[in-house]
Amino acid sequence: MSAAEQKSTAKADSHDLIRVRGARENNLKNVSVELPKRRLTVFTGVSGSGKSSLVFGTIAAESQRMINETYSAFVQGFMPTVDRPEVDSMDGLTTAIIVDQERIGANVRSTVGTVTDANALLRLLFSRIAEPNLGSTTAYSFNTPSVSAQGGITIERGNKTKREVATFNQVGGMCPRCEGIGKVSDIDLDELYDSSKSLDENPFKVPGYSMDGWYGRIFKGSGYFDPAKPIAKYTKKEMHDLLYREPTRIKVEGINVTFEGLVPKLQKSMLSKDPEQMQAHVRAFVQRAVTFQDCPDCGGTRLAEHTRNSKIHGKSIGDVCAMQITDLAAWIADLDEPSVAPIVAGLREHLDAFVQIGLGYLSLNRPSSTLSGGEAQRTKMIRHLGSSLTDVTYVFDEPTIGLHPHDIQNMNQLLLDLRDKGNTVLVVEHKPETIAIADHVVDLGPKAGSAGGEIVYEGDLAGLKAADTLTGRHFGDRVRLKDEVRTPTGVIEVRGADDNNLRDVDVDLPTGVLLVVTGVAGSGKSSLIHGSVAGRDGVVAIDQGAIKGSRRSNPATYTDLLDPIRKTFAKVNGVKPALFSPNSEGACQACNGAGLIFTELGFMETVSTTCEVCGGRRFQPEVLEHTIDGRSIADVFEMSVDEAEQFFSQGEAKTPAAHKILVRLKDVGLGYLTLGQPLSTLSGGERQRVKLAVHMGSDGGTYILDEPTTGLHLADVEQLLGLLDRLVDGGKNVIVIEHHQAVMAHADWIVDLGPGAGHDGGRVVFEGTPAELVADGSTLTGRHLKDYVGA
């Protein structure tokens, strides 16, 4: 090798660090950091300290942005918009693959099998060796209908043309009755309209169908009905037109529009959507008006009869998709068909990845919208486990969410395997079990929000334990078992619970105590509590699902905090409250109170720029002249919850109604949030705690919390336990679905489900106090809790 070649090689080998200089995204304070490549780096720190801003908002965002810029402008228009982060410079970046907790799709046709490509491999397998054979893979797809056509075609041969009759047939796997959804709906017509009223009397009960709006004007102007005639007196033809008429072009008020019967219109606009993604009032209407049941033709398999009859070793593709993945993996392993050996090998690898990652209890026909945030993140990981890519950067957001301590060990091994293949693995995490396996630790703080955004420690685990940071001081924290537990005041009876994998469970859930329901992922915890308790009167279920709202929604608007604040500003300044709303009279007219100007650029990405008129402050200049103790309403939007709680507790700003809401937000550990922060930027754990703060003022007697420790730093867990104690001591029944040993140790009563996941679970394996669970030691939970408390 020549000297020049040696010099070149040495120079290339010097790029073994990812260097970030001067990062200022969100609350980061000019942060500079060097991260080793091909190592596992864990970022920790209290919620709101800047971890996600550094990892996702800076490093991963810049990597994605630079890759996107290599595509044409047209292609970029179909890709997610990524703005350049606020940072001076970065080098050493590699391709970033983000594996986050965002829920997977709201499409009713999306299943675990479709989002992981397992269904594609199964369709290929069945198209080759199933009997009777149906031909192409489309015949085994529940998203492809069977179609046939016949007509004349023109064929050119030389200088002659010839017309022939041709037929076209495509065999699809879609059940024609339910159109591949697996469920059919039965609509209660009494919930659609009041039959005693005429069109002139606004008879429709469907949200948005007022007679003053376009829908009402189309029905009245169609000419099919007498507007003064009650619906109860309609003829058979009029009822058919009202409910079922096919789309028909008509002219109303001089405008060409399409008239369509109520039922098909509702099926397209509402019933084809995932109920969880609807606005609350629309979802309530659908739940009142529509009953969903398994399609009687296909039995919920989504598949046409000919597809259900095409089988391999006695099983159709619908049968195998309904199997638990661990069972399906065993069935595939037993297939000895040399002609499809590569397909079988690919499926085995795919299904083994499910089992390895702790999702073996799922089935491929499970709707993807029903997966939790942790399950969704692990499902996304599957496509990366067998990847032959190396030297890429994998970015994970709390991969241990939703995992029992037993499952965390497997997750840790997966992270190490990705690293050992030559990849850089960046993990945002709070669990000490995962921090402990890191090659390099970056601790942000010292606190949250404006008091965070700095790197307070960088180095190995031993140095972190010795560091005088919140993480270092609390790393070895352990919650002791209680000396005395509360005495139950009664019970909530659950009898014959059989949702999902539950096996006819009978259990008495004590009230007046802190009740923790635990067990490995997939053991049936959520099925038991959400299926048998959540729907009862006086029960408030608080989950981590997305909060519905526009990009204007923020903690101040969602919690109704803004109303009393506006009234105080109006009273002190002698003006109208509407002036102090960015959605009303006081809004900046240039940006309509958004603070940003959004510019649509056709097929290219929409550009958002700070409004030059208001400087991003949302209000007209004259509104900002009205102040309380020198602070304007725009200043209030920029306050953290902690600052606002102090501000509205005294002086002329004193507002008891607002102060009460702020105290609740502070109690749930959200003191670092700013009042104007968009709700879309909150994590799952933050969303749950915002909802909890809202419901703490409600009359509900029983609260169900689903993994409230999600996103909580070790130092914040103690505050959460104090909050749970205050709720119980205040007369609430608190049921917590949780894996965190600190919450288990602090419980008064534990219900442990298992012993395993999927069909290996679904049974109550222990009921009693935490001390009894540790002493019993027969369950996975008991053994891990025993190790935790050092018993």
Image (cartoon, rainbow, N blue to C red):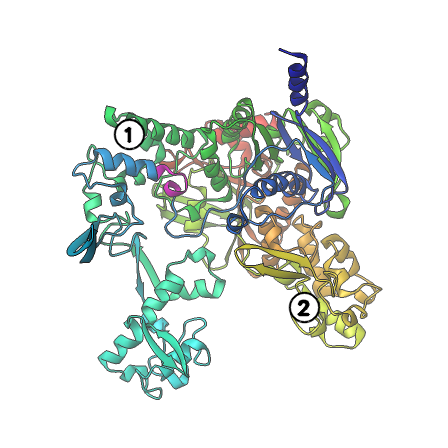
Towards the viewer: 488 or 126: 126
Of the two numbered discs 1 and 2 on the same chain, state the one appearing first in sequence.
1
Q: Is residue 216 left or right of residue 594?
A: left
Residue drawn at (28%, 76%) of the image: 241
Q: For residue 88, which quarter of the picture?
A: top right
Indicate the position of residue 471 as horizontal and vertical percent values: 70, 34
Towards the viewer: 114 or 152: 152
Indicate the position of residue 419 as horizontal and vertical percent values: 56, 25
Residue 470 is inside the magenta segment: no
Tag on residue 751?
none
Q: For residue 657, which quarter of the picture?
A: bottom right
Towards the viewer: 477 or 241: 241
Indicate the position of residue 334 as horizontal and vertical percent values: 27, 25
Q: Residues within 10 Å of mark 1 (few under 14, many from 20)?
A: some
Q: Is residue 780 left or right of residue 761?
A: right
Q: What count of labels does the image hold?
A: 2
Q: Quick one: which residue is furthest to the front in this view?
A: 159
Per the picture, the main secondary structure of the magenta-coloured stretch is helix
- Is 483 above or below relative to 543? above
- Is 297 above or below relative to 572? above
Identify the amino acid type marked 2: Asp
Q: Which residue is mark 2?
A: 563
**Magenta highlight range:** 112-119
Disc number lying in front (1 or 2): 1
**Can residue 592 be seen from the camera position used here?**
yes
Q: State how far apart marks 1 and 2 are (Cα).
A: 60 Å
Identify the amino acid type marked 1: Trp
Q: Quick one: which residue is furthest to the top in this view?
A: 1
Tag on residue 331?
1
Residue drawn at (26%, 28%) of the image: 340
Please, what secondary structure does the residue beneath circle 2 have? Answer: helix
